[in-house]
Image (cartoon, coloured by chain):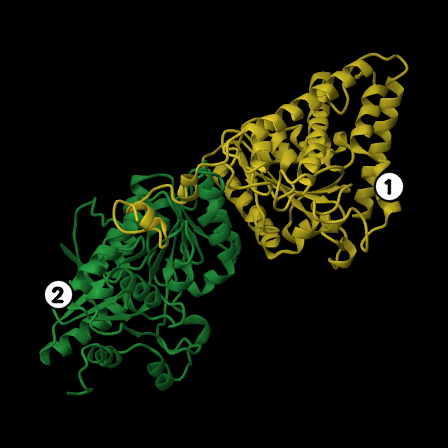
Amino acid sequence: MVAKKKAAAKKKTAAKKKAASSSPGKKRGDLGGMKQERLHELLRMMLLGRRFEEKTAEAYAIGKIGGFCHLYIGQEAVTAGAYAPLRPDDYVITAYREHVQALSKGISARAVMAELYGRADGCSGGKGGSMHLYGKEQNFLGGWGIVGGQIPLATGAGWAIKYRGGDQVCLCFMGEAAVNQGAFHESLNMAALWKLPVIFIVENNRFGMGTAWERASSLYDIAQKAHAYDMPSAVADGMDVLDMARVVGEAVARAREDGTPTLVEAQCYRFMGHSMSDPVHGVYRTKEEVEEHKGKDPIRIFIDKLKDAALLTDGELEAMDRSAHEEVDDAVEFADNSPEPEPEALYSNVYAEENEHGRLFFDRKNRIAEGG
Amino acid sequence: MAEITYREALNQAMAEEMERDPDVFLMGEEVGQYNGAYKVSKGLLDRFGEMRVVDTPITELGFTGLGVGAAMLGLRPIIEFMTFNFSMLALDQVWNSAAKLHYMTDGQFSCPIVFRGPTGAALQLSAQHSQAMEATYVHYPGAKLVVPATPADAKGLLKSSIRDNDPVVFMEAELLYAMKGEVPDEEDFIIPLGVADLKREGEHVSMITHGKMVHVCLQAAQKLEKDGISSDVLDLRSLRPLDVDAILTSVRKTNRVVYVEEGWSYGGIGAQIADLIQQEAFDHLDAPIQRVTQADVPMPYSKSLEKLAKPSVERVIDACNRVLYRKKGS
């Protein structure tokens, strides 16, 4: 594994040199095998994600958003890079730090913000909240609140794709703490055994809430865990969108080819506390450590690379950021004006099919139904 | 009508539904090559192939979640638990994923999945293999719970469950698999969920029950008949949805109720039914509702202790005598 890591590092250096050598001429070209248009899309995704989460923090602070709320700030490159090789008909499933993953899959900022506000126009009708965003149309299989609970579901998406003979893939995101759950191991075994087109992406932001990875796992090297299931694995720099795109791109190609799953460790860092109710630093990490990592901001790194390669001007960047701000402001206004769910929504959609016969509910709903 | 076993009835239901709908597949431990731990899936692998009859590793949480994920994408999995005892390892996926999916997504995704396998005690399987899991499962809104007692019900209700667009927990019984009974031949023999079946009609007492306790109650009713007591034996068949009308009709007629179930007493199905009756038919009760359940202990291995722990014909008769204010043995 160490050798693998070194090789990856070497590759990265080579890529850097290549990028640097292309800069003197300032000729616009490709970066990481992607055209400028696609690269700009990824940057827009990251900027929108960052601005959205900043606004979310503000709204949470003034009580507009309730419950548990886990922000993605610092980890934007993981999702943008992982989405780079996706087609719209590919699937994504994830845990509960998922606002940006939902946005980037095409759910509107309005619908996501309205959901955080618990309003009727939210992407889950106000019934899910921050941890349970869904978008059927966008093949976004949602946010799941039990650590590791989404991983077996991802194998099911993979199974359904294989069952129907499709060539889509399913990305399954999880935090590094989830890999100690049984669900992770059971799922990797099934995915490898049956060749299910799932890419398991472990966002190793180093802390499961307040427990450092090294204090939670007997084996630090996450990618190695795939060896137990004879599954390909790779490590990606989760602060570098291009490295993420490269690593996940290879995994997606394998999955499309013959269903081979891959385990990807995305090494990243969250700049915020575990959730909005947790401190940014404290007993488990120092302020200095957080500041040091903030110095390696994934958005800044990407901007520098694009500028270096003459693929981005200051004007373009300003316009993109302004547009991200505007989209988020519009989303907040929309959420604020969106109505509360109707009281009838309390009992709607518990079942897809309410039987003609017999009683399904055993509480006051019966009396409501009978006018009592 | 043909006389077939409960096991064959389940097998026919699955085969017919798999024939009818290519999205239906069966997955679980030993369901394929081995033909099922209790031979319920006999011959299905040969008939439908490896993508549709899938032997899994022993990984309940994993394959249950796989089923739910596949259902999210529109397939209609039948997930077999070798017994519901083992399903405890998978409860996160049944409750947190399957049962809540439709609600949490506000109706965007549905979860047309069946979880099936035997519940309750067989013979001398001791504490970890003898649990009646109905009360555990009925608690969660979003899922349905079906407990068939006869071959005909097994077939008609399983076909309904497979066609249902919600997660259905379908509980069978080891001791019923070999039971024979008349089952209608027609291809589209369906019994809707939520309709109880009055398996025996009487006027003095209502035995309300589900699953294999139906047969214990029928035996008790037969013995009581000789004693001049006639009983309703109401088989609920599904516990969610629940045929409340059938319960209340019987209560209003006999005014005396005994609930019989294999599970434990505290928080049991009978507790819920008793609550429902006192809420909705209080004035019709002539005696406190009696319940017959498993003894409030983990199931012991010893044959004699196991017998003491399980509901029996004698205990059911005794409970009927109590609601009738008859002295024991009189």
- Residue closer to the observer: A258 or B258: B258
Q: Assign a secondary structure to mark 2.
A: loop
Chain ID for green: B
Q: Any mark on residue B201, and which?
A: 2
Which residue is at 87% across, 17% downward? A23
Indicate the position of residue B103 as horizontal and vertical percent values.
Answer: 45, 43
Indicate the position of residue B298 as horizontal and vertical percent values.
Answer: 44, 77
Above or below for A332 versus B51: above
Chain ID for yellow: A
Above or below for A285 versus A166: below
Task: Answer left or right for A314 relative to B159.
Answer: right
Q: Any mark on residue A291, and which?
A: 1
- Residue with the most extreme right position: A24
Which residue is at 58% across, 26% downward? A334
Task: Name the quadrant containing residue B169.
Answer: bottom left
Can the viewer see residue B142? Answer: yes
CA neighbours of label 1 inside 10 A, class few (<14), some (14 to 19), many (20+)? few
- Residue closer to the observer: B221 or A260: B221
- Residue with the most extreme front position: A372
Where, quadrant-wise, is the N terminus of chain B in this rendering?
A: bottom left
Q: Amino acid at mark 2?
A: Glu
Mark 1 belongs to which subunit? A
Task: Answer left or right for A136 relative to A216.
Answer: left
